[in-house]
Image (cartoon, rainbow, N blue to C red):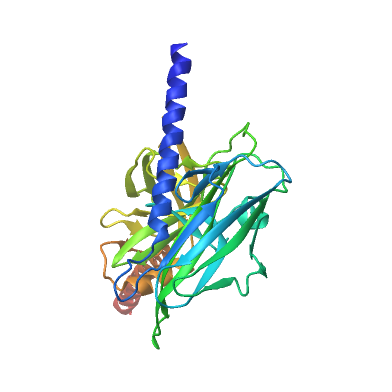
Amino acid sequence: MIKNSLIKKYELFRVSSIILVLFIGCLFYIQPVDASEENPASILVDVQPKEYEISDSYIQFSPELNKNYEFTATITNIGDKDLDIAVFPSVALSTMGSVTYVENKENLLDKNYDLAKYVKIATENGELEDGKIKVEANQSETIIISLNITEELDGEVLGGVNFSQTLSEQSNEDSVDIVHVYEKVLLFHLKMNELNTEKEQTYDEFEFVNSQDAIKLDYYVLNNNPTVTFAENGPYKVINPNGEIISEGEIETRAIALTPMTKTKLNLPLVSDAELVSGEYQFIITVDGKEKITRFSYTKEALEQLIEQTNGSNHVVVNQSSNIWVIGLLIIFSTLLIVISVILYLKYKKTRINS
């Protein structure tokens, strides 16, 4: 009985922690840049009905299959200029620090968990033109969000509807253009059928990158379950093809929230004077006392590109195994030449003495 009580308390704490992380993540993403007097954010969004809203702009409920749910969102322009507001459905993606809501579906592992598949956005007069709605100064406009889950799903669907106001644009001839936006996100957290079996997290797409004069190991952790969870935690180490540890540390408990059926990009610092060579590496993380090993390869071509990028501006020793073989062959060849030269000299000297 005590054990069951402890389990329930832990699950309650786990769920509460995840909800807190998601809510904080939503707050972080609502405003990617700070508004100022020069670039003021001037939209307010109010959603109806309120029965599914557990906090401001956070809707959570368990929708029935093939049932239409309708929400209205009133956009109010409190500024003195007319605005074109972009409205679009988004996917919840984890980062190392929070959860963001983006239109790009590249990191979604299963398209059935894309909120956009089940959402239609329209004005009271019909569809949005180019995904935008014009809101005149000191006026309001209403859009209709229709939600209909047409697939039998387990776990959770997590996404949002974004209201995006462009604050400023900066054109650069020598680099990419910069656009500052303010975004209000209406978050949808849909609880589907209970998940009976869970799959383990996996790791993929390992790559050494040069960032700010330091080499790091980028990789993705894949949440293969349709539930919000945390990244595996515990001690880790990365071993190069020579059997040397080039990165080690510990991933903290409940440090990184993972959104359903998505892959999250993380990175690890390398130890000073770590040696990189082409060949097979090992990423080892100890989870609940058991080592979990993921092997990945680093090609000669990728190593050559990294060498070009670094230009000796970091503390990582980058070697190519092919260079070692070349040096070895040159040493052997030189040694053979010396031996042959000595033998020929001795034979020549002996011939002269005999003559």
Outermost residue toward the front? 138
For image coordinates 65% across by 39% down, the residue present is: 154
User: Would residue 186 be visible to someone looking at this image?
Assistant: yes
Q: Is residue 23 above or below residue 12?
A: below
Q: Position of residue 284 (x, y in %)?
A: 42, 42
Quarter of image, res 73: bottom right
Image quadrant containing the C terminus: bottom left
Outermost residue toward the bottom? 173
Classify residue 124 as left or right of residue 241: right
User: Would residue 340 be visible to someone looking at this image?
Assistant: no
Figure label count:
0
For image coordinates 56% across by 71% down, the residue present is: 133
Q: Nearer the viewer, residue 131 or 245?
A: 131
Classify residue 122 as left or right of residue 279: right
For image coordinates 32% across by 54% down, the residue present is: 269
For image coordinates 29% across by 73% down, the residue present is: 37
Q: Nearer the viewer, residue 344 or 299?
A: 299
Q: Position of residue 170 (x, y in %)?
A: 38, 82
Classify residue 297 as left or right of residue 244: right
Outermost residue toward the top? 1
Q: Nearer the viewer, residue 168 or 305?
A: 168
Q: Nearer the viewer, residue 73 or 281?
A: 73
Q: Position of residue 69 (x, y in %)?
A: 66, 49
Q: Position of residue 289 (x, y in %)?
A: 41, 30
